[in-house]
Image (cartoon, rainbow, N blue to C red):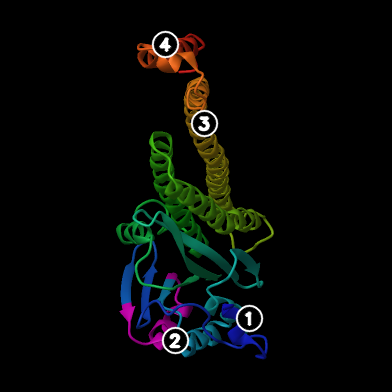
Amino acid sequence: MNPLSGKTGLHPGALIHIGKKKTESTRITLMDYTKSSYEKHELENIDDCFPFRDKDSVTWINIDGLHEVGLIEKLGNHYGIHPLVLEDILNTEQRPKVENYGDYLFIVLKMIYFDEEESSVYTEQLSLILKGSTVITFQEIPGDIFETVRKRIEGSVGRIRVAGADYLAYALMDSLVDNYFITIDKFAAAIDDLEEDMVDDPTRQTLGYIYELKKEILYLSRYVRPVREVVSILNRDEIELIDKSTIIYMRDLHDHVIQVIDMIDIFRDLSSGMLDTYLSITSNRMNEIMKVLTIMASIFIPLTFIAGVYGMNFDRIPELHWYWGYPFVLTFMLIIALVMLVYFKRKDWL
């Protein structure tokens, strides 16, 4: 069933959560900092973050859980976020994109994880709004890949505490892309294991794994390739919300995304090559079986002919009344079989 079917007949901007409810309660965390100050809060009410809007500091509001539509609508109304943006935030089936609304940027990305036990990729949508000195992020579940960013803010590591909210947005995107590399490494390890299994003893189950791998690569590519376009747009000088000093870092981020896409292309080629290798291995195995059967048939054809001749119901066959006739024929048949085996061996057919 198409998850968008639940919006049939509703007006544009109608707020409805599309996707799985992945957490029971919504969690709101807030970090506010300047070069010389830092504070962190876990809030019970969305209203508690509103006083930070007018402060001369960088504020990061993170929402875990998207099923409480009223909370997200209230937050959007306070910060002047367009209803269509709120609609996209609540729809977890979004494609990675960036939209410039003048006084704020709306960015959708996918956090990608690799389940080593299931050898499959799963995603979580990240929606990010950059408005003035505030960054608002929306995630589907608690727990993410941004703990290093939080530690850098808390410990004032690097330039994150002296830069603006645009640099914070970059830092979050950079952590997301860095996690792509971790996922890619796990994916590569799974491919290596599959290649070893395929060369050692390919089975029908191996073929299923290869097709599953190809599907996961396509799934991975679907959510990573658009990120290149997102970062390319953020690299443009005409976006006033991104400082020129941050654009330099965005360009570096763009290079990282290109590296990830190149690795995914390599995986796609490897999976296709693995399928060809599997078919070649199984074809060679079948050829070996057919060769053995053909050799056995070739040996038994003359033996069957001799047995057929002496199995005819004729009385006037001189050898039938010869005392040594039976052992002679058996010895002769054995010699024929041995001669043919030696011949096949010399031809390297055995």
On screen, residue 189 versus residue 244, left or right, reads left
Please state the extent of the stretch shown in magenta in the rendering.
42-59
Residue 262 x %, y %? 57, 42
On screen, residue 11 versus residue 19, left or right, reads right
Residue 81 seen in this snapshot: no
Quarter of the figure that contains the N terminus: bottom right
Instruction: Tell us which disc is closer to us: 4 or 1.
Output: 4
Identify residue for label 2: 68
Say if the magenta span includes residue 53.
Answer: yes
Instruction: Tell us which disc is closer to us: 3 or 1.
Output: 3
Instruction: Tell us which disc is closer to us: 3 or 4.
Output: 4
Residue located at (43% from left, 55% from top): 175
Question: For numbered disc 3, what is the local secondary structure?
Answer: helix
Q: Are marks 3 and 1 in contact (CB under 8 Å)?
A: no
Considering depth in this image, is 108 or 1 the residue closer to the camera? 1
* CA separation in Å, label 3 and label 4: 24 Å
Residue located at (38% from left, 41% from top): 193
Considering depth in this image, is 88 or 296 the residue closer to the camera? 296
Q: Are marks 2 and 3 in contact (CB under 8 Å)?
A: no
Identify residue for label 3: 290
Pick whichever of labels 3 and 4 is earlier in the sequence: 3
* CA separation in Å, label 2 and label 3: 65 Å
Identify residue for label 1: 84
* CA separation in Å, label 4 and label 2: 88 Å
Say if the magenta span includes residue 267.
Answer: no
Quick one: label 2, few (<14), some, or many (20+) residues within 10 Å?
Answer: some
Residue 136 x %, y %? 48, 73
On residue 335, the disc is: 4
Pick whichever of labels 2 and 3 is earlier in the sequence: 2
Q: Amino acid at mark 2?
A: Glu
Instruction: Tell us which disc is closer to us: 2 or 3.
Output: 3
Pick whichever of labels 4 and 1 is earlier in the sequence: 1
